Image: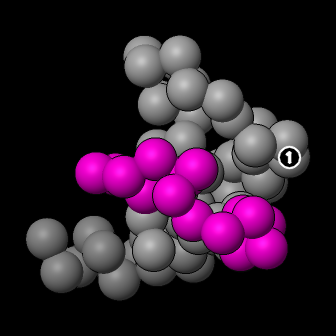
């Protein structure tokens, strides 16, 4: 469901909002907009920012909670 080898314009309009639930699709759409000057659907920058905060915060919390176990495993 990530539009890497095809433009988002080939997908029916009714499914464009579903791409915002895929963090990799948001990133690919932003890169396509910057590099290939393709149109970026509205809401993609906000969705990408939300994914960065959620995944970054989740990773930070996980590694903080596993700090003692990671030291022993290494």
Identity of the residue drawn at 85% across and 46% down: 43
Query: What residue is shown with label 1?
Result: 43
Q: Residue at x 58, y 34 (%)?
A: 30
Q: 13 left or right of 4?
A: right
Quadrant the N terminus occupies:
bottom left
Given residues 53 and 21, the one toward you in this image is 21
Is 19 inside the magenta-drawn segment?
no
Residue placed farthest to the left in the image?
74
Residue 9 visible in image: yes
Residue drawn at (43%, 57%) of the image: 3
Quadrant assignment for the C terminus = bottom left
Q: Quadrant of residue 2?
A: bottom left
Answer whether residue 60 is visible to the viewer in this image: no
**In the structure shown, which secondary structural element does the residue marked by tag 1 occupy?**
loop
The magenta stretch is 3-18
> Is residue 11 highlighted in magenta?
yes
Residue 73 in which image quadrant: bottom left
At which x and y percent is residue 57? 69, 60
Q: Is residue 55 above or below residue 46?
A: below
Q: Compared to 58, does 43 lie above or below?
A: above
- x and y, in percent, of residue 34 in the image: 53, 17
Q: Is residue 1 left or right of residue 5?
A: right
Give how far across and how far down residue 45 sits, in percent: 76, 38
Q: Residue at x 55, y 42 (%)?
A: 29
Q: How many C-alpha atoms fall within 10 Å of the one at disc 1: few (<14), some, or many (≥20)? A: few
In this rendering, the answer to whether 55 lies above or below 30 is: below
Q: Nearer the viewer, residue 52 or 23?
A: 23
């Amino acid at each position: 469901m990530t539009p890497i080898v095809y433009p988002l314009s080939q997908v029916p309009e009714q499914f464009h909002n579903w791409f915002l639930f895929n963090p990799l699709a948001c990133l690919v759409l932003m890169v396509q907009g910057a590099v290939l000057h393709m149109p970026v659907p509205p809401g993609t920058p906000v969705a990408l920012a939300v994914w960065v905060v959620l995944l970054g915060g989740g990773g930070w919390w996980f590694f903080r909670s596993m700090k003692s176990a990671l030291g022993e495993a290494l």
